[in-house]
Image (tube, coloured by chain):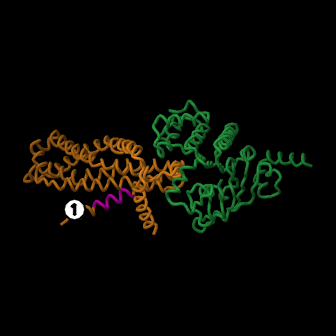
Amino acid sequence: MIVVNDIHKSFGDNHILKGITTTFEKGKTNLIIGQSGSGKTVFLKCLLGLFYPEEGDIVYDGNSYASLSAKEKRNLRQEMGMVFQGSALFDSMTVQGNVMFPLEMFTKQPQSEMRDRVNAVLKRVNLTDAHDKFPSEISGGMQKRVAIARAIVMNPKYLFCDEPNSGLDPKTAILIDNLIKEITEEYDITTVINTHDMNSVMQIGEKILFLKDGLKEWEGTKNEIFKTDNEAVTNFVYSSDLFKKVRQMYIEERN
Amino acid sequence: MNYLASIGSYAIMVKEVFRKPTKWRIMKSLILKEIDELIYGSLGIIIFISFFIGAVITIQTALNLTNPIIPKYLIGFTTRQSLILEFAPTFVSIIMAGKVGSYITSSIGTMRVTEQIDALEVMGVNSLNYLVFPKIIAMLFYPFAIAISMYVGIFGGWLAGVFGGFLTSADFIEGLQLDFIPFHIAYAFIKTLIFAFIIATIPSYHGFYMRGGALEVGKASTTAFVWTSVVIIILNYILTQLLLGQ
């Protein structure tokens, strides 16, 4: 579980995060949504420890980040897995090399054990025949699956995903969403996903946090988002005609 | 003010490179890969340029020493001094700033743009040590490339001088041995080692701290080449004054 207490972050005079307080629960897919420039990416980078908030604190399973020593912070980082928007796979390494990288870097396991672990996670993300291929030789969807495999290979406690299905076709996007949800439940990890994709919100949004201008505007579940009267949320969620019609049907059905 | 800030962040970067080292098992393979890319991969262009520049220095010297009182062996002497003191260590370094420097900036810059550096940071890897340290160590082998440049340049000069009919082989070799000061070789290698550090770190700095997309990677490569060349030229002057000046 991650508890965020009133965090503030600025870059020069630009006050990006203006005091966000929330909780991300273990074993659930927590989604952060909001318009571009709302502070989602900065917020995610604060959760990852890449940016340090000027005020407030982030508590990871009872451990306040601000009070951790440098070594403890490094150890905490190794309990985090991250899936980047563009996958961020290392171009010079094969799929197997990418997934094995954290194991080689931080464990003293023999090569055979590391290979077994890599095979297991690649099988888990349904990639069994791409071990020796380079990232440039596989599709965007496969790259995302390799990125997920790399993120979970160290058995993380926390999984962060930045726009995990951007650039993917709707069918592959749903597969990736479902894979993240299954892995969250299976590994019992705290997953935080930054997304614009309303299909993801409806598919896997067990907890949704809506940010606006660096502040928490709304939070709830995918069922509650249908019923909310918050204008900023409804404007954002129902910006497409398809979702407007879905909402209209929902309201008519309710009446 | 911007220049001062850049010098400051460059110094901080260099300090970070030597902090929290990467596992030796991984670092070893990274160093070997960089030696292959930066040194072995540059030998072809170094040999090609050195050979022809050596030949041209000999021909130009021969054509300008028309006074019959001036002995022919001075052509060999001038070729040796030009190649050992300046051409091999300094001008080959500027060529390397273009070839190796732009490779370093663009490869690190592309990793920045595609979030690969963020991925390293999130994992808790000291990305500066992982990316820049192997390049610095690989560039310690740069003096070997410069030694080859000196040898090939003199060989090119000998071929052009002798087979071009400008002087005899004996005259050229006599000039090569004339007033030889061993410290000049040490001076050349001291310069080379310092330039090697500059060629590894300034382009890394421009790649690592760049922001933006593909266009900015190109701009960063150009800026890195300009600044690496400027620093090499200035340091060349300072080192020459310090090491050879009275």
Label 1 secondary element: helix
Say which residue label 1 marks.
B243
Q: Which residues are magenta?
A: B227-236
Looking at the image, which residue sits at the far top?
A: A129
Q: Which chain is green?
A: A
Q: Position of residue B145 (x, y in %)?
A: 28, 45
B40 vs A17, left or right, is left
Q: Nearer the viewer, residue A75 or B213?
A: A75
Looking at the image, which residue sits at the far front?
A: A62
Q: Is residue A138 above or below residue A163?
A: above
As for residue B234 lying within the magenta part, the answer is: yes
State which quarter of the image contains the C terminus of chain B: bottom left
B178 vs B233, left or right, is left
Q: Position of residue A194 (x, y in %)?
A: 66, 51
Q: Is residue B13 above or below residue B170?
A: below
Instruction: State which quadrant residue A16 falls in.
Output: bottom right
Majority secondary structure in the magenta region: helix
Q: Nearer the viewer, residue A167 or A25?
A: A25
State which quarter of the image contains the N terminus of chain B: bottom left
Q: Position of residue B92 (x, y in %)?
A: 30, 50
Q: Colour of chain B?
A: orange
Which residue does the image show at 37% across and 52% down from the upper left?
Answer: B200
What amino acid does circle 1 point to?
Leu
As for residue B176 lying within the magenta part, the answer is: no
